[in-house]
Structure formats: structure tokens, C-alpha cells
Amino acid sequence: MTTGIGSSAASRQAASCPAAGNPTGSTMWLRNPMAVHLGRDVDSKQASGGIVVDTESGTIIELVSAGGEPTGGRQAVAEVVDASQHVITPGLINTHHHFYQTLTRAWAPVADLPLFGWLTNLYPVWARLTPKALELATTVAMAELLESGCTTAADHHYLFPTGMDDAIDIQVEVTRQLGMRAMLTRGSMSLGEKDGGLPPQQTVQDPDVILADSRRLVEAYHERGVGAQVQIGFAPCSPFSVTTELMRDSAILAEELDVRLHTHLAETLDEEEFCRERFGLRTVDYLESVGWLSDRSWLAHGVHFDTDEITRLGEAGASVAHCPTSNMRLASGIARAVELEDAGVNVGLGVDGSASNDASNLIREVRQALYVQRLRYGSEDVTSTRVLDWATRGSAAALGRADIGRIEAGKQADLAMFRLDGLAFSGSHDPIPALVLCGAEKADRVMVAGQWRVLDGNAIGRDGVQLDKEALIAAHQEEARKLVAG
């Protein structure tokens, strides 16, 4: 592997001090934070004194109220971290991405195109993807996400050209090296140009191959239950790139193996028109016809659902990954996120592929969601705490997780810590609104399962060694140039 993890750059140690006495266990007290986001309907004062983490089990064991101390006093914890300069949120959760697309950021031929034109120009480029390029692209995307405060990421990988049979296996290895959590979806395309689809033939696969590999990946890697690090989902790409038979068979297999389903849906008006012409159905009718209208499914974008469809999605318990930057970048429209949530749909946030966003930064996506949704619903209904909830508890629900996305005793110790210093925050008064409105770009520290994965703004691997970003960028840039050059 050439991820840059395990480089000569030494990791920076956490600024902490040992507690007095000789405590037992592996407890850490993140003491007296500037502010903690517990949720828009939760009194944050119950954690004003900090958060106590068991670094061995990777769980939150106690919230400390203002002026208080952990149960048993300070001497009962092994390590105390001064969090007085930090705003702490649950680890942010990214519900939609295409890691491989970090190789085609800001490529001039597609910089100003809508979705279908953008795709048809990029498919032949992406068809040249190699294992080395994917490994580097995945590492860059996940490291960038980590440094933005993201602790769990869902990736939608649907490209399996010749030589790329082990694409998801590669992503599993990078996930483990970085110590992040991931929902890696086995995407697919089976409807090529000659059969009326959008992708070129060299990018599509036989359905039997797709389903067999989907089963293999679940059996090899899917972790279940509390604290799972790697999970597998099934993700036929979109109505214009897979057959109805593959959609149905994927739903049946997902039910059998008890995994989640993901696809693009209602992203653009072109897609809506494609569904009407090919299937004689709107997108949600099509979803129901192939057995996907259920609480097992989470859908990328969901920009063009009508009011009746929003109600039906809520009644089914489906989820939507809202991708505001991508929707603006491709001029796709504004998702009806508030109405979706009010109807019972789990709304999460996604950065989407870097070729339609050009960044893998989830705290930036929170701010984008706030502003684009205010254009539709006004400022009172779209608050800083609401969009932070979309990036945490809403995203967790979209991925079927109840153990992450919240700061509560018993939940996983996945935490992001942001500093509000520098010119951008000078003069700000209230920490939670400042985090979003003043435009935080990077987390100072990030913890996954009780272990530091970002220190002083720099990603570190599971071996505790700081990521060699210079070497990673150089290798990634070289692969990006080769991919585009052909």
C-alpha cells in the first residue's frame, strides 16, 4: 500500500495531563469545553463540564455538568484533556461520496456542464481507473474528511473496469489503516449505451457477476452491531445505468443478507424525464416497483420529489442524503430537506463525489446546507443546530446506525473538536452558531472509538503516525494526471 501512513513524520501528542492518583482503566476526561452540540432538542449544559471517554471500549461513559467532576472525582480518570478552547460535536457522518472522483477534481472539460453531459465526458476517463489510483484516491478523500471532523463515511463505488475486481477490498484496507468508520457500498452499472443507458459498455458488468461479488463482500467484511467499523451496502448506481432486474435482485439479496440499499434518485430533471420515458413512472413510483421503497434504503440527492412522494418516503421510513454543494455545482436544484424531515424521512448530509463538489469537507457542507435551505425555507426553520443534526444524528439514522451520531453515555466515542480562533472567528460570541456561520474549515482533533485520528489538524493512522501528506499528494497528483491523459 502507498497511502502515506507509516511515514517518517512523527505524530503529535495530545496536549493532556495525567490525573492525580493512580486511576484504573483507560478513562479520558475532555474537560470544560467551550461548547458541546448535543442536538437541537437537548440542553447542552448537561455536558458543559465535559465528556468522559473509555478509550479501551471506545465509548462515552459520562457527561459532566457545569462545574462538576466525573463520578469518583478527578482522581478516577487516567487522563485529562483541556477542552476549554474547543467546540465539541459528535463525529460528523458523510452519507454519500465517490472517493475515486478525487482524481478528477476541477477538470476543465466538465467544469461547466450539467449532470448528464458531465457524466458522459467523465465515464471514459474513469474507465481507466487502476488499483493504485483508487487506493490513493480513497486515502485522500478519507483523510480530508477526517480533518474536517468526519468520523464515518459512506462511499458509493460503482466502477469496476478490467483489473478493478478488488476495488472494495482496497477501500476496506484504507479504512482500517486510517482507523475511520465506513459504509462501503458495492455499486454497479449494468445498463450500457447499446441498451439505452448512459454509461459506455466498457464500464458495465453482468448482473450475475455483480450479485456474486456483492454476496462475497458482505460475507468477507460486513460487521454487525454496536461499534462496527466496516459495513457493506448494495448500490446500483441510478435508474439510467442499471436494469430494473438488477434493482429488484439487489433488493432481494439485501433483504436476505440484512444490509442497506443505496442509489441516486431524483437528482435532476433529466433523470425524471428518463424514468418517465423508459419506465412510464416517476422516480418514487419506479423505486416502489423494484422493491426499494422501505426503511432499508437511503437515497442520494432527492432534489425533485413532489409533496406526495415526500409523504410516501416518510411513511416507508426511507432516508435521503442531502448534498447541497453538489446540487449547486451541477445546478440540479434545492432538495426539500425540511419537508422531508418533517414527513419522517431521515435527512443526512453528503459531500458527493469530488468531481461535482471538488472538496471532501463535511463541516463546510454543514454551512452550505444551512444557506441553501434558508433560500427555500427561511432562517427560522433552518438553524445551525438543525443542520448539525443532519450531519450527525440524521446521517447516522440514514446509515442504519444507532450507536454513533450523538454524544450520550453508552454511544461510541466518535467526537470532533473545533477551535474558534483566527481572524475568521474574531468578534464571534456564541460558539455553536459561530462554528457554522463563521465557516469552520478543519477540526483540531478528531476521535474515533476513543482513539485520536486527528491531532493538531493532521490525520494520523492507526499506528499513531501522522499521515505523510506531502508524499500522498505527490503520488495522488501523478495518478490524477495519468488518468486524465489516457
Image (spheres, helix red, strand yellow):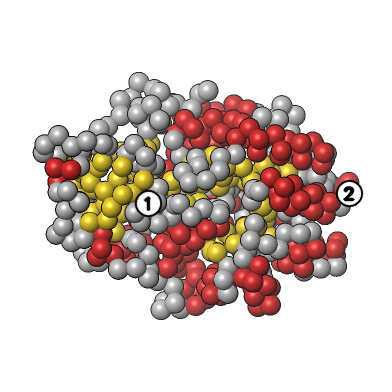
The residue under the point 66% across, 67% down is 316
214, above or below 68, in the image: above
The reply to whether residue 40 is visible in this rendering is yes
* Residue 300 x %, y %: 62, 57
Amino acid at circle 1: Gly
Mark 1, residue position: 410
Residue 318, numbered label: none
* Residue 404 x %, y %: 44, 52
* Residue 174 x %, y %: 52, 32
Sequence-first tag of 1 and 2:
2
Amino acid at circle 2: Asp
Q: CA distance from mark 1 to mark 2?
A: 51 Å
Helix, strand or loop for disc 2 = helix
* Residue 71 x %, y %: 20, 51
Q: Using the image as rendered, state which of residue 66 and residue 190 is in the foreground.
A: 66
The residue under the point 64% across, 75% down is 311
Mark 2, residue position: 195
Q: Using the image as rendered, state which of residue 332 and residue 61 is in the foreground.
A: 61
Q: Using the image as rendered, state which of residue 374 and residue 19 is in the foreground.
A: 19
| Residue 72 placement, left or right of 3 | left
Residue pushed farthest right? 194
